[in-house]
Image (spheres, helix red, strand yellow):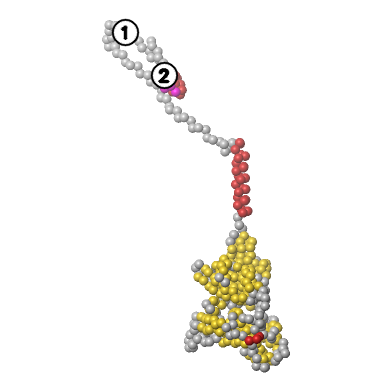
Amino acid sequence: MLAADVEAEPDSSTRRALRAARATVRLELPEGFMRPGSPLPAGARIEPATIQLPAVARVQPAPPPRSTWLAGPQSRPALWTAGALVLLLAATLLLLWPRSGSLVVTALGPGSREVQGVTIFVDGRPLCQDMPLCRIDGLSAGAHTLRAEAPGLATPSESTVEIAAGGEATFNLDLVSTVPPEARGGGLRIAATDSELTLYVDDKRVGKLPQEVSGLSAGKHWLKLEPEDGSPAIEKAVTIVPGEMLDVDPTPAKRDKTLVTIQLSPESDGASVTLNDAFLLDFPAELELEPGTVHHLSATKPGYEDYTAEIQVDEGETEKLIEVALTPLEGASATRRPKAKSTRKPATAKASTGDATQGVLNISSVPPSQIILNGRPLGTTPKTGITVPGDSLQTIVFVHPKMGRRRAQKFVPAGKERTVSIRF
């Protein structure tokens, strides 16, 4: 009997399977089998032995163990540190992120005129006093309410402006009169002088000095003091404030330039007026012009004839009044000459103005624009507190990339503050 152990596949799993399925083969052979010359018994056959091995399942290698560093106890300090850093970064960004903005407010009276003694309120708090142009920084982002007050004037209602974090907003407040029409009158007083003078107010005779005139409407009025001896009359422009009595000095003003006042007739209100191609914004407009010069005045208004005139400033004139009166297109006549009133001084009466003090100019525009003051670029509006020579005429050019150029002039008296504000 022959016995054989069959093993295959050298790996451990296969070897174990083969060892468990050992096969023993028992063969019975006739005597003398395989000896030389021994015959094979009749009918005898040798069948090959078949060894049936059990099926062996192929074993897949086990996957590598999953990392557990994030779930292990030793990883928790790292996670806490990372979380703390993220929170610290978020808090830093929150603190550094801008949460406030700024606001530039312009408060103008009727006809876009400068207002004295104005107070601007933001959220009910008076933040700008006696400042028609005001810049406010540090306002929280969001909506804020605005209003303004001045003697006899106020905004009709509160306005709302939106402030963006880190941004700058501009807003214009328009003031209207709060005085009832029957109580808006003012007055003036003029004392007597050594010479006899007769007072005229807006070309209406009042009488000899002294005089006290009441019931005058608020705004500009033109006075003329006519001497009895036939010498040149004294002319003055005065501003009447509602409810106040103005004391007027009857002596002539001492100037080495001529003060030219340009005013609009009632039908000309709202006209676009230029003097030497420079826009005049406030009316009555007061300009100081050199004696012995000629200037070109023009005005336009839809539905009216164009107005053109030459203004000649004579030597010795101290003051001149020009009234622009437009004619409707229907039945319009030729261009009208300006109505001018002048005062002449004797050649020996010309006096010097003396040492001039400084004036202050504020400039703004809606929308913001680049400005050029007397040929010198100043940057973007608004600009406040610009020091200029007193009793001087300032020329401002507004330049906007989409809306073009606007030119304006403003007379700044010595020791006074004036504001120029335009809308494109």
x then y, percent, for residue 397: 55, 71
Q: Is residue 90 above or below residue 101?
A: above
Q: Foreground: 313 or 165?
A: 313
CA separation in Å, label 1 and label 2? 28 Å
Q: Is residue 180 magenta?
A: no
Numbered circle sitting on residue 7: 2
Tell me, yes or no, if residue 219 can be seen here: no
The residue at 29%/11% (across/down) is: 44
The reply to whether the C-beta atoms of the residues labelled 1 and 2 are less than 8 Å apart is no
The location of residue 199, given as percent across then percent down, is 67, 89
Relative to 46, say whether 276 is above or below: below
Q: Position of residue 419 (x, y in %)?
A: 61, 73
Q: What element does badge 1 sit on?
A: loop
Residue sitting at 63 percent across and 76 percent down? 391
Q: What is the magenta range? A: 6-11
Is residue 59 at all visible to an observer of this figure?
Answer: yes
Residue underneath mark 1 = 33
